[in-house]
Amino acid sequence: MATDAEALPAGEDKKQNEALVITASSLGTVFEWYDFYLYGLLATALSHHFFAGVNETTGFILALMAFAAGFAVRPFGALVFGRVGDIVGRKNTFLVTMAIMGLSTFAVGFLPGYDTIGIAAPIILMILRLLQGLAIGGEYGGAAVYIAEHAPPGKRGFYTSFIQTTAMLGLILASSFVVGLRTFMDAETFNAWGWRLPFIFSILLLGVTLWIRLQLEESPVFRRMKAAGATSKAPLKEAFGEWRNLKIVLIALFGAVAGQAVIGFAAHLYPLFYLERVAKVDGATANFLVATALLLIIPCFVFFGWLSDKVGRKPIMMTACVIAIFVYFPAYKALVAAANPAMAAAVERSPVQVVAHGGECSFQFDPIGKNTFDRTSCDIAKSYLAKNGVNYANVEAPAGTVASVRIGDRTVAVPDPAGLGDAERAAAVAAFGAAAKAGLDAAGYPDKADPAAVNKLKVIGILCLFGVLATMVYGPLAALLVELFPARIRYSSLSLPYHIGNGWIGGFMPTIGFAMVAATGNIYQGLWYAVVIAAITAVVGILFLPETYKRDIEA
């Protein structure tokens, strides 16, 4: 036992190992986030190739659900790999998670589409997403614990902040790859097969990452525990079956991670979907703007991690949550105005209203592709507007009223499909679509954003605001989570709240947000999700989250 404890590196060896630990863990997590963000960046292509059997709006939401599916299983991965990490060790656990995650992503590059193998295509895609999500459930906790347990006292926030930068670096790498392909390929080629290349390329990143991580040794804290026979025999039972630990898990989830998750997604992925689907900015420009903003705010992760070593984790994180509550609605409205001023002007000048009886309107989402949204006049109107990303308000009308669409001072009649045959109904729907488009064109609603009119500096500035808020909650987070829990159950305890927060609460934000937009017609409706969660975190965190930055993590 003494020999194992004394075998820990010291002096210059320890310093060298610390540098290797930060570099290897951070580079590995860059690859992790590169893989994960590809699904979000290529949601439109995935929708086209794997969900072609449903209408366009539903297909896009299903693609987002495939993206979210990987998040859904992350807490289960946290339980599985967290337990392994607390019993077997930190290093070997995140080697396994990395291999599973990387191979699942690589396989997507060769997966046949819906037009080739039918319903099997989205099913296999979902299985690959689930495997990747399961693996990532054990990845972040391993990297966070591994670095923190190597960091000297007073520098844990600074050291672990380098992990937090990797989410941005992974997104930038993925975005740069996608933008480059879209720049050098015509749209038809990219949509046909070019989108597969980033997934195939991931096998090279996987090989490099595994090689780097194989150079690491086990965490000194874990080695000392193992040498002393102090590791937990049942970490899950100890972590979640005893109230004194479970209470801290719940506080960590609702008082820190939940707010971090929605603020992070409101800074990284939600703006990308928003620019493409709502502001109608072309994909290459939207990726460039988001990647540029993220590149600019990367140093803030390290700054706020360092600052949290000086003033504490809690005040920085809670300040970001409070600010987010008040800035999201005005900032996102400013984002639309900067990215597509013609659309913002048209919405202001000629707002769109759907006049219909609410009981005749369906929720504009059909996961099995059976609803064509053409059985009532309300559905015909809302289906067209949702598909074209048009912001509208609902005006209640008496039961039995045939719906109409108001575009400013102009009214477009919607056909009543009752009693019409399939051919007649299709013709009536097409005629309405033509009339609605003419009305929107006359009111100045653009089909897409004019590239010359996009105020790129202003868009990047707004995105940087979102990004700084994300760095305030994310920069100190890893150190906070490590410090909250005892070493013997640390991997399990911190992994579960982190992945419930980021997997369920944050991961479903794009899907829920755009479903809310499709259901209500209000392009800003989905922001309520982020605002409410941030408010809950602010209240719980301020009242119950302990300050941890001076704690001893050896215990």
Image: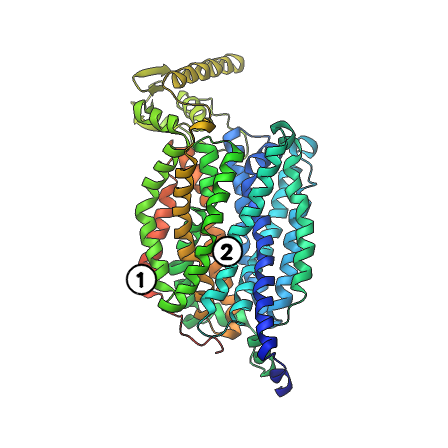
| Residue that mark 2 sits on | 165
Placement of 30 over or under 372, stated as above or below: below
Disc 2 marks a residue whose amino acid type is Thr
Residue 502 location, x and y as percent? 48, 53
Identity of the residue drawn at 41% across and 38% down = 457
Say which of marks 2 and 1 sits in front. Answer: 2
Residue 358 visible to an observer of this rendering: no
Placement of 77 over or under 338, stated as above or below: below
> Residue 207 appears in which quarter of the rendering?
bottom right
Of the pair 186 and 1, the residue shown nearer to us: 186
Q: Which circle's residue, 2 or 1, is located before the other in the chain?
A: 2
Residue 210 location, x and y as percent? 67, 59
| Residue that mark 1 sits on | 542
Tag 1 secondary structure: helix
Identity of the residue drawn at 40% across and 56% down = 472
Between the residue at mark 2 and the residue at mark 1, the CA separation in whole angstroms equals 25 Å
- Dot 2 surroundings within 10 Å: few (below 14), some, or many (20 or more)? many
> Residue 206 appears in which quarter of the rendering?
bottom right
Q: Answer left or right for 278 relative to 26.
A: left
